[in-house]
Amino acid sequence: MKDLGTFGKTLQEMRTYWGITQKEFAHLARVSPSLIISIERGRRSPSEKSHRKILYALNKIMKEPGRKPGPAALGFKNKEEQLRAENALLARELSRWQYMAERWGAELDKANARIDELKDILGLREKKILTEESEQQKVEALGLEKIPPVEE
């Protein structure tokens, strides 16, 4: 009788680990839900055929691509509790990214202001250079010498 309880308990632990109800597992194993309930409670022992079906279903679940452990495997009582915890984590992550975006946004605004400042300075210098070059061209066109700037 001790083996019945051990197998049933192991079955229940594995089934809940993968987040599958007794009814869903029974369907996968192609046995009756009442058999799964009885086995997990240690009341019944599966026949050899049912035992193979149960083991095959467990193997199938574990090897199924994309299958993730259920809420119990992660320490949650149910899916709702798991979703609340995941939402709390996502909310914290979102607020962290919002803070970073605001911080970087302020830094970006400062950087853009500095870029504009530098463009203005560069533009004025380019204008001055162009003005000096055009003055030089006018002087040369007239055949005159450029008068050097007066130093103070």
Image (spheres, rainbow, N blue to C red):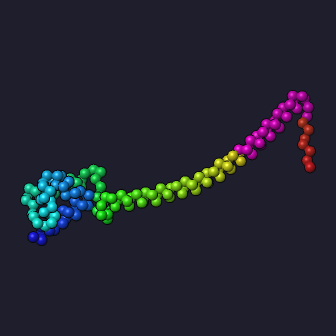
Q: Residue at x 49, y 57 (%)?
A: 95
Percent position of residue 108, x then y: 61, 51
Residue 14 belongs to the span the image colors magenta: no
Out of 113 and 102, give the one closest to the viewer: 102
Query: How many callouts does the rendering have?
Result: 0
> Where 14 sits versus 115, above or below?
below
In this rendering, position of residue 107 left or right of residue 143: left
Percent position of residue 128, x then y: 80, 40
**Is residue 37 visible to the viewer in this orientation of the structure?**
yes
Percent position of residue 141, x then y: 87, 28
> Where 148 sits versus 86, above or below?
above
Give the image quarter of residue 129: top right
In this rendering, position of residue 17 left or right of residue 85: left
Q: Residue at x 71, y 44 (%)?
A: 119
Q: Residue at x 50, y 55 (%)?
A: 97
> As drawn, which residue projects farthest toward the bottom?
2
Q: Main secondary structure of the magenta part?
A: helix
**Region in magenta:** 119-145
Q: Quadrant of the N terminus?
A: bottom left
**Is residue 57 visible to the viewer in this orientation of the structure?**
no
Give the image quarter of residue 72: bottom left
Percent position of residue 120, x then y: 73, 44
In this rendering, position of residue 74 left or right of residue 103: left
Out of 121 and 4, give the one closest to the viewer: 4
Give the image quarter of residue 81: bottom left
Out of 152 and 41, give the one closest to the viewer: 41
